[in-house]
Amino acid sequence: MIFANVLSQLPIALPAISYKAVAPELVLFGGALLILLVSATVGKRELPGLYRAIALVAALAEGGFSGYQLYLAQGAKASLAVAGAIAYDGFSAFAGIVVAAILLLAILIGPGFIKRIAGDGPEFLVLMLISAMGATVMAQGEDLIVIFIGLEILSIALYVMVGYRIGDGLAREAAFKYFILGGFSSAIFLYGIALVYGATGTTNLAKIGAFLALNVLTHDGVLLFGLALLLLGFGFKVSAVPFHLWSPDVYQGAPTSVTGYMAAMAKVGAFAALIRVFDIAFAGQIVQWRPIVVGLAILSMVFGALFALRQRELKKILAYSSINHAGFILLGVYAGTAAAISNTLFYLIAYAVIVVGTFGLVSIVQDSIGVSEGSCSLDQLRGLARSRPALATVTAIMVLAQAGAPFTTGFLAKFSIIVSVVEIREYWVAVVAMLSAAIAVAFYLRIVLAMFRGEPEEVEGERVLAIQGAATEAPARRQALAWIGVSLSLVFTVGFGIFPQPLLDLAARAHIVG
Amino acid sequence: MTIPGSWYLVVAALLFGLGAFGVLTRRNVIVMFMSLELMLNAVNLTFVSYARMLNDVGGQVDVFFVLVVAAAEVVVGLGIIVAIFRQRATVTADDISSLKG
């Protein structure tokens, strides 16, 4: 009764929702719901083919729609929708394409290996689609709270995926570590939002930008502390040094196919939001945040490369390599020009495809030598080139692409970021970046050497036989779809490495017009 | 006597610091988890105080979003803790430290 009274007196003005603007999210979330619905209504719970088909269609639809948006949005100003909380522009459309690419590869690679751990249930693909939706929300968020919600949708789904091998001690520990430190960083991020809100009176990025352009804060301590906390939160999420402590453990403990997916998706979401928040809304505060960002970038590049050198565990080496990559991407944020943002997007798609492909290969390697999806030491790779030459060669190409070998997208990505840094005349930063890339080559080569040197150990053969006996189907069949995913990422990496122009043009279209 | 808004902000900052300290130093997994919730609620208090000081309803609405997210986090977090507890019958962080950086 009272409620009805209130309603009649104060008509609540609902914002007009532009479904076109939120279509990427709707498609991904719809796909996830559909899979759940099918698994609940059809008597049989395990329909891997159907689930995978639905997920693939959702990913392709999301990618296709984002591509169409990118085509439309060419150079146009960001359109705001849903009461200004969601932006859709070339930038978010490009991020949507990256998300679709990651999803496509991960759907092809992941489920076959997850099946051995947790069966053919619908959960894995549902979690994957939902976390991808979180990443698109982050890329489109024009309001700090919306970005926070996107971050949480992404992270909470990832916490579950990391803990998939719950029977294994390392995996449980990894899931718990990821959860506690992820929650910790989310709380810090949120406190940053609260302080920015206190200083500017709004959480909307467009309004924050307008407010800061018109007003000079006499006491900007609250705002700057808020900015620092936001950066700290993002630093945790992208695992920049010194907030990287969780990442090697989580990368090792999580199932390998999840590790690749997480490394790519979490970075795409976090960096898209980071660029929108800092390079656009807080562009006026660039003098204050630039030193922090460049500090994080340099620490990540240098220590990521150095720490990787003393590791013997393959997945931890790749974790430090992704910390090194995070440093490079942070340099793009640091440069902050329109060209630098395009180069950052190019780096993101190149990195995402390479990293999903590399971890997919690690999955296949682990499957072939008969270890679980958990850890895998360099010693176990010995003689892989002799026993599985094709696998070793493809792995070597992908690892070298991570190192930035010419004729791969990895090289162009690093090169274009360094060009952006040189363009803003910060030569010493560019020199440090190149040095760190040179150090990084050393540990990438160690992985390649481990595969191509030495005979396979005698024990290995027996172990492979034992596992093959235990598995219900031959590894070759299990790996078939994973090979398709890996081949796609290889073709992408080498193809666009040799003919990069279409991809560069696409990224150049995607810059944000403030 | 009216209490100035900044007092609430100070209380919220103290609570947040307390929560952060708890997450970083306590050994019991459940207590770490509680400290995390304390941090989120300190943020809620900050939002509400600012909303009051700025005479803007936006901050109060943000609190609802935070509450929902915190609830979702509880679901997953407790799930993970229960899974750990089932295997080890103990919930101190010292026992889950076989992974080292």
Image (cartoon, coloured by chain):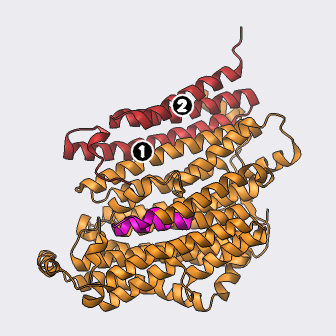
Chain colours: A orange, B red
Residue A252 badge: none
- Quarter holding the N terminus of chain A is top right
Which quadrant holds residue A51?
A: bottom left
User: Residue at the location (75% across, 65% down)?
Assistant: A426
Which stretch did the figure color magenta?
Answer: A307-326
User: Which amino acid lies under the numbered mark 1 shown in the image of this protein?
Assistant: Ile
Q: Residues within 10 Å of mark 2 (few under 14, many from 20)?
A: some
Which quadrant holds residue A457?
A: bottom left
Give left or right: position of A50 versus A88: left
| Residue A313 lies within the magenta run | yes
Front position in the image: A341 or A31: A341
Asked if one can make out residue A53 in the rendered structure from this viewpoint, the answer is: no
In the rendered image, residue A436, in percent from the top left (x then y), is placed at: 57, 69
**Which residue is the site of mark 1?**
A180
Q: What count of labels does the image hold?
A: 2
Q: Chain of mark 1?
A: A
Front position in the image: A110 or A419: A419
**Which residue is the site of mark 2?**
B17
> Are the residues flagged by discs 1 and 2 from a single subunit?
no
